[in-house]
Image: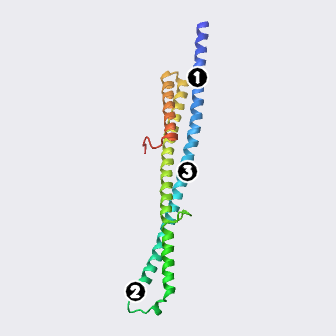
Amino acid sequence: MSGGHGGHGALEGTNKSIALLISVLALMLALSETAGKSAQTSALGDNIDASNLWAFFQAKTIRMTVVRTAAEAAELQRSTPTVSMASTGGPAIGKQIDAWKATAQRWDSEPETGEGRKELAARAKAAEERAKTNLAKYHHFEVASAAYQIAIVLASAMLITGVAALAWLAGGLGVFGLVMTGIALFAPHAVHLF
């Protein structure tokens, strides 16, 4: 009778170990899901930032082109020999041409505000890179979450069936999930999944 009781104690210990494994896997799943959603939200925000910056860049380009065209047209008109200086505005038009050129130059590069075309393009590219990184993180967290979920199912099935191999598979998938979580956190571009 004591042999049967010892077997029951071993089974109870195994069940507790599997329950603990399931708890740890569930914790890792929750953390992975939370981090994945955060990365996904950040990727969406970075994409929106990049789109807004590129739209601002395009608006500056259009405005700059219009002002440069006006300055060039005024210069051409002034340099035409058949048009008198009086009819082209004399010194006033020269001042306006200079103002247009200065404005166009400022719209092309304005480091002090970060809103020149060159600065906007650099900021947009940086936002695109952040979006790519966050999207890579999101994909890795999703794979990790799937591994944790399958591991929980396998560990639960081990409790019902008593097949020890299911516990080993669950543990292996848990380790794989941890690896994918680590990749997502520290090297999201190291492994390309999608």
Residue at the outermost front position: 91
Name the secondary structure under disc 1: helix
Name the secondary structure under disc 2: helix
Please give the residue where the numbered disc 2 appears in the rendered image. 79
Question: Label 3 amino acid?
Answer: Ser
Residue 59 in view in this figure? no
The first of marks 2 and 3 along the sequence is 3
Could you tell me if the residues under marks 2 and 3 are in contact, i.e. CB atoms within 8 Å?
Answer: no
Question: Label 1 amino acid?
Answer: Ser
The first of marks 1 and 2 along the sequence is 1
Model colouring: rainbow
Residue 154 in the image: above or below residue 85: above
Relative image position of residue 174 (x, y in whole percent): 51, 31
Question: Label 2 amino acid?
Answer: Ser
Identify the residue at horizontal 50%, vertical 30% (top origin).
175
- Could you give the CA–CA distance between mark 1 and mark 3, rounded to whole angstroms? 37 Å
Could you tell me if the residues under marks 1 and 3 are in contact, i.e. CB atoms within 8 Å?
Answer: no
On-image quarter of the C terminus: top left
Q: Local crowd at mark 1 within 10 Å, few (<14), some, or many (≥20)?
A: few
- Residue 17: image tag: 1
The first of marks 1 and 3 along the sequence is 1
Relative image position of residue 16 (x, y in whole percent): 61, 22
Please give the residue where the numbered disc 3 appears in the rendered image. 42
Residue 17 in view in this figure? yes
- Could you give the CA–CA distance between mark 2 and mark 3, rounded to whole angstroms? 55 Å
Identify the residue at horizontal 52%, vertical 34% (top origin).
178
Identify the residue at horizontal 52%, vertical 62% (top origin).
53
Identify the residue at horizontal 49%, vertical 37% (top origin).
180
